[in-house]
C-alpha cells in the first residue's frame, strides 16, 4: 500500500464500511497467527495490538479456573506494558491500594495506624522505651511516630480521668513504719460510661453471657508493684480476671492502709454505688464486692481478722467459730451501721468495740454483705499452706526417727573405711557426730581450765592483775561453753531430712514453687496445680518410696514399726488433701454454679 493511500486513510474522517470490515478480519487473522500480538506500522513508533477476551461476568461471579485464566492475561499485559517481569507493577499497585482493598484481600498494610499502635502498647504492656526499640528493629512495620500516638492517647482519655497528688501514708525505710508523703492518685470520672462501653464491645464480639437477665459486676481492690488499684470486673464473660477484662477505676502509688483508702475511695464510691440495679439495654446491672479478707474488713469498718468478732458475714466470736458453733445471726449493712452508732454512743472507749461487735468505722461502700464474694482463693492459699506444713511436720518426725537411729550407729561405729557405702544423709550424720565429739572434748578442756586456772593463781600468790586476767579467761571460757552447748543441742534442722527434701524436689519437678517471702506460702496457680487428684496421689507416694529405697535397710525392726505407724498417719493427711481438693476445684472457677454443684460443695465442706 502506497504512502499516499495510508495518508489518505489517516486523514479521512470517514472510512467505508467494507474497508473497515476487511481491516478487522486482517487484524484478527494476524493476532491469531502471532499468539494474540500484532504490531501496526505508523509514521512514528509502531503500535502494538493485543488480543483481550471479552468478559460477560464479573470476576467475583466466575469460577476459580476462569479467574486464574483472567489473572494470567492481566499479568501478560503488565509485562508487555512495562517491558519487564511485572514485579514493579505489582509493587506500585500494592502501594496505591487503599486499606479497605488490603483488608478485603486479607493483606496487612505496611503502615500501622495510630489506633493499632496504641492497641499494641496496651495489649502487650509495651513501654515507650520498648516501642522505640521495636521501631528501630522493624522499620518495615511502619509504626507511627511517638508524638502521634501520645496525641491520640490524650484525645481518647481527655476528660475521663482526674490525676492529682494527695498526702497519703507511705512506708518509711523500716517496713513497719509509715510517714505522710505526696503520692500520685488517678481516678475515673465516668465509671458507668466506661463499663457500659466495655459491655458493648463484649456484646459485639459475642463474649457476653447474661444470667437470668442480669449482668454481674465485681468491684474490689488489688495491691502490687508499690501501687493500690481499685477495679471493676465483668463476671459474665470468659476469664473475667484477665488483665484485658479489668477496668481500673482508681489507682494510687501507696499501700492499702485504712488512712489511704478513706482518703481516696470517696472519689468514686458514689459512682460505683449508683451502678447497682441500673439498666443497660434489656439487662440489670448487679454489683458485688471482692478482695482479700483484710481489705474487706477495712471496707466495712471492722476492727480486723484477729478481733474478737472477726467474721464479716456473721456475729460469732472467734472462740465460737473455733468451737464449730453454727452462726445465730448474719451481719447486714443496716446492722453494721447500727453497731457503728453504738460504738459512737459509747464514746469510743476501750470496751466500745465489744458493744459494737468490733465495728469501729462507718462502711465505705453501700454494697450489701450478701453481695460480697467470699475470698475463696485466699482461703485456699491459707488452708493448703497449713495442710502442707502438717505433711512436712509428720515427714520430719519420720526423718528424726531415722536420724536418731543413724546417730546411734555412727557413735558406736569406729570404722571410718566404709564412707563410700553411705548415702548423703548418713554421711552428714557421721560428720555431725564427729563434730559433736570434738565439741564435747573442747568443752571438757574448757571445764578443766575453769577449775584449775583460778585456784592455781591463788596458790601461787599471783598479784591482782594476774588474777583478773584469769577471771577474764574463765568468763570467756564460759561464754564459749554456752555456744558449744547450743551446738550440741542441735539435732536435725527442720526440712533437711531425706523425706522432707524429697517432697521439696517433687514440688520443683512439678513446678510448684514456694515463695521466699510470706512464710514460704504458695501462689494461686501453684495451689490449683497441687490440689489436682493425680498430683496429690503422686505427692504421697514420695515418703513411701524414700522409706523403701533409703531407710528400710538402715534401721532396726522396732524403729521400722514406728516408721510404718507414721506412714499410716500420712494417709489420713492424704484424705484431707483429696477432700479439700474437691472443695477448691468446686469453688475456684469462673463458671456459674447450679443447685446440684452448690449442694455438693456444701457436702464437701461439712
Image (cartoon, grey):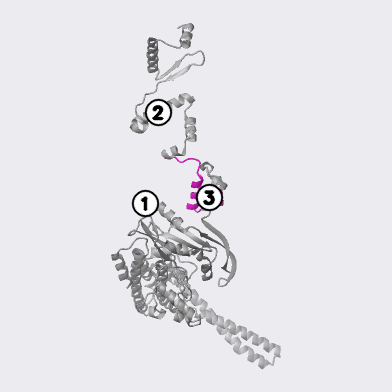
Of mark 2 and mark 1, the one earlier in the sequence is 2
Of mark 2 and mark 3, the one earlier in the sequence is 2
Which quadrant would the N terminus be assigned to in this image?
top left
Residue at image mark 3? 155
How many angstroms separate mark 2 from mark 1 (CA)?
Answer: 42 Å
Q: Which is more toward the observer, 329 or 227?
A: 329
Residue depicted at x 32% and y 70%: 602
Q: Which residues are magenta?
A: 106-133
Residue at image mark 2? 72
User: Does residue 243 show up?
Assistant: no
Residue at image mark 1? 206
Question: Mark 3 against mark 1, which lies toward the viewer?
Answer: 3
Residue depicted at x 55% and y 84%: 444
182 sits left or right of 107 in the view? right
Residue 165, percent from left and from top: 58, 62
Callout 2 secondary element: helix
- What's the mark number on residue 548? none
With respect to residue 215, does 457 lie above or below?
A: below
Residue 126, percent from left and from top: 52, 52
Callout 1 secondary element: loop
How many angstroms separate mark 2 from mark 3 (CA)?
Answer: 48 Å
How many angstroms separate mark 3 from mark 1 (CA)?
Answer: 28 Å
Decide: few, some or many residues near mark 3? Use Cα within 10 Å; few <14, some 14-19, many ≥20. few
Residue depicted at x 40% and y 53%: 202
Q: Which is more toward the observer, 269 or 512?
A: 269
Q: Is 345 colored magenta in this rendering?
A: no
Residue 386, percent from left and from top: 41, 72
User: Does residue 476 show up?
Assistant: yes
Amino acid at each position: 500500500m502506497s504512502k499516499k493511500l495510508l495518508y489518505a486513510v489517516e486523514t479521512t474522517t470517514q472510512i467505508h464500511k467494507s474497508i473497515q470490515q476487511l481491516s478487522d478480519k486482517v487484524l484478527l487473522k494476524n493476532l491469531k497467527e502471532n499468539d494474540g500480538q500484532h504490531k501496526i506500522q505508523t509514521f512514528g513508533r509502531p503500535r502494538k495490538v493485543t488480543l483481550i477476551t471479552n468478559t460477560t461476568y464479573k470476576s467475583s461471579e466466575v469460577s476459580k479456573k476462569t479467574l486464574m485464566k483472567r489473572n494470567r492475561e492481566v499479568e501478560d499485559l503488565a509485562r508487555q506494558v512495562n517491558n519487564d517481569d511485572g514485579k514493579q507493577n505489582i509493587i506500585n499497585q500494592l502501594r496505591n491500594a487503599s486499606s479497605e482493598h488490603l483488608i478485603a484481600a486479607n493483606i496487612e498494610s505496611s503502615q500501622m495506624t495510630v489506633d493499632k499502635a496504641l492497641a499494641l502498647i496496651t495489649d502487650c504492656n509495651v513501654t515507650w522505651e520498648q516501642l522505640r526499640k521495636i521501631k528501630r528493629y522493624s522499620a518495615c512495620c511502619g509504626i507511627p511516630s511517638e508524638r502521634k500516638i501520645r496525641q491520640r492517647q490524650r484525645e481518647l482519655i481527655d476528660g475521663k480521668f482526674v490525676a492529682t497528688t494527695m498526702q497519703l501514708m507511705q512506708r518509711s525505710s523500716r517496713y513497719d513504719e509509715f510517714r505522710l508523703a505526696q503520692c500520685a492518685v488517678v481516678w475515673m470520672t465516668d465509671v458507668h460510661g466506661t463499663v457500659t462501653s466495655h459491655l458493648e464491645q463484649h456484646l459485639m464480639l459475642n463474649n457476653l453471657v447474661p444470667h437470668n437477665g442480669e449482668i454481674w459486676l465485681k468491684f474490689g481492690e488489688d495491691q502490687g508493684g508499690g501501687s493500690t488499684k481499685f477495679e471493676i470486673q465483668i463476671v459474665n464473660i470468659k476469664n473475667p480476671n484477665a488483665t484485658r477484662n479489668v477496668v481500673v477505676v482508681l489507682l494510687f502509688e501507696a499501700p492499702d492502709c485504712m488512712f489511704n483508702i478513706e482518703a481516696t475511695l470517696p472519689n468514686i464510691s458514689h459512682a460505683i454505688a449508683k451502678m447497682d440495679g441500673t439498666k443497660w439495654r434489656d439487662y440489670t446491672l448487679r454489683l458485688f464486692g471482692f478482695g482479700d479478707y483484710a481489705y474487706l474488713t477495712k471496707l466495712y469498718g471492722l476492727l480486723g481478722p484477729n478481733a474478737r468478732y472477726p467474721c464479716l458475714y456473721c456475729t460469732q466470736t472467734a472462740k465460737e467459730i473455733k468451737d464449730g458453733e453454727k452462726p445465730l445471726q448474719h451481719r447486714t449493712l443496716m446492722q453494721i451501721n447500727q453497731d457503728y452508732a453504738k460504738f459512737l454512743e459509747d464514746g469510743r472507749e476501750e470496751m466500745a468495740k465489744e458493744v459494737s461487735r468490733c465495728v469501729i468505722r462507718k462502711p465505705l461502700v453501700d454494697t450489701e454483705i450478701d453481695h460480697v464474694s467470699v475470698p475463696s482463693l485466699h482461703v485456699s492459699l491459707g488452708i493448703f499452706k497449713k495442710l502442707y506444713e502438717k505433711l512436712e511436720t509428720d515427714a520430719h518426725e519420720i526423718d528424726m526417727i531415722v536420724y536418731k537411729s543413724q546417730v546411734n550407729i555412727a557413735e558406736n561405729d569406729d570404722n571410718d573405711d566404709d564412707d563410700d557405702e553411705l548415702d548423703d544423709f548418713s554421711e552428714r550424720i557421721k560428720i555431725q557426730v564427729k563434730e559433736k565429739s570434738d565439741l564435747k572434748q573442747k568443752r571438757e578442756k574448757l571445764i578443766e581450765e575453769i577449775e584449775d586456772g583460778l585456784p592455781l593463781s591463788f596458790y601461787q600468790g599471783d598479784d591482782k592483775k594476774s588474777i583478773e586476767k584469769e577471771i577474764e579467761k574463765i568468763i570467756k571460757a564460759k561464754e564459749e561453753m554456752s555456744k558449744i552447748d547450743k551446738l550440741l543441742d542441735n539435732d536435725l534442722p527442720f526440712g533437711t531430712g531425706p523425706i522432707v527434701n524429697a517432697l521439696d524436689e517433687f514440688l520443683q519437678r512439678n513446678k510448684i514453687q514456694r515463695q521466699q517471702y510470706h512464710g514460704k506460702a504458695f501462689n494461686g496457680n501453684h495451689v490449683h496445680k497441687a490440689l489436682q487428684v493425680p498430683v496429690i496421689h503422686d505427692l504421697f507416694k514420695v515418703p513411701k518410696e524414700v522409706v523403701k529405697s533409703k531407710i528400710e535397710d538402715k534401721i532396726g525392726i522396732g524403729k521400722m514399726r514406728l516408721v510404718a505407724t507414721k506412714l499410716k498417719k500420712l494417709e489420713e493427711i492424704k484424705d484431707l488433701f483429696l477432700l479439700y481438693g474437691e472443695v477448691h476445684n468446686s469453688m475456684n472457677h469462673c463458671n456459674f454454679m447450679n443447685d446440684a454443684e452448690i449442694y455438693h460443695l456444701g457436702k464437701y465442706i461439712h
